[in-house]
Amino acid sequence: MAAQPPLTELPLFPLATVLYPGAPLQLRIFEPRYLDMVRECARADAPFGVCLILQGHEVGASALPAAVGTLARITDFSHGADGLLGIVAEGGTRFRVAHTHVRSDGLVRGEVALWPAEPVLQVPVEFFLLQTILERLIETMAPHWRHAPRSAYDDASWLGFRLAELLPLHDDERQRMLELIDPVSRLAELRDILPRFQKG
């Protein structure tokens, strides 16, 4: 019987979005519970967890988070003209939530099992069209990826996560792309979804 991975406790930030490994995340923080969370994470140089909201809302009462999420590590801070704190974070390791509890201030904390990184696999020839599609999406929608090395497009995991990040998928599809553990299977599912976005 395989040993269970050790559990790590961390604050969870349920959002109406899915964060993928390597993806940037920009947030404006104004609720006291999340301002405290950002302070704690910055002080300890520790990540927080981002999970898609399954029930509830980003603001107000605690929302129900999806069971699989992604670590987010803060890389930059700013203050807007409206006085709100802005942060930039980057997606890291995926995790599965084992247990959650809600603090008195409404912040959800979870015990999570971290997932191993996906293997680096060469993009199979039948998915080369996806590389071209991603190049076009980046040119029009994601200038922050314009300087990605050519070798990144040959990595099935990177290609799949970037397509899932930029294509107009439904939330349940985005979450499924996060939860798949085989990067080539992710490319296959994305390829099968693509005809939906083609103009008639």
Image (cartoon, rainbow, N blue to C red):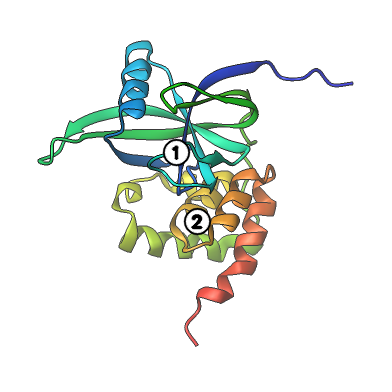
Binning the other alpha carbons within 10 Å of mark 1 as few (below 14), some (14 to 19) or many (20 upward) gives few
Q: Residue at x 29, y 53 (%)?
A: 143
Where's residue 52, x and y in %? Answer: 52, 44
Q: Looking at the rendering, in which quadrant would you find the N terminus?
A: top right
Disc ID at residue 159: none
Q: Residue furthest top?
A: 44
Place residue 104 in its image quadrant.
top left
What amino acid is labelled 1 in the image? Answer: Ala
Residue position marked by numbered label 2 in the rendering: 163
Of residues 169 and 200, the one nearer the viewer is 169
Where's residue 117, x and y in %? Answer: 61, 31
What amino acid is labelled 2 in the image? Answer: Leu
Q: Residue furthest right?
A: 1
Where's residue 160, x and y in %? Answer: 56, 51
The disc, 2 or 1, on the residue closer to the chain's N-terminal end is: 1
Where's residue 65, x and y in %? Answer: 55, 39
* Dot 2: element: helix
Place residue 32 in its image quadrant.
top left
Disc ID at residue 61: 1
In the image: residue 124, left or right of residue 70: right
Of residues 64 and 165, the one nearer the viewer is 64
In the image: residue 51, left or right of residue 89: right
Q: Relative to 179, is 125 above or below? A: below
Binning the other alpha carbons within 10 Å of mark 2 as few (below 14), some (14 to 19) or many (20 upward) gives many
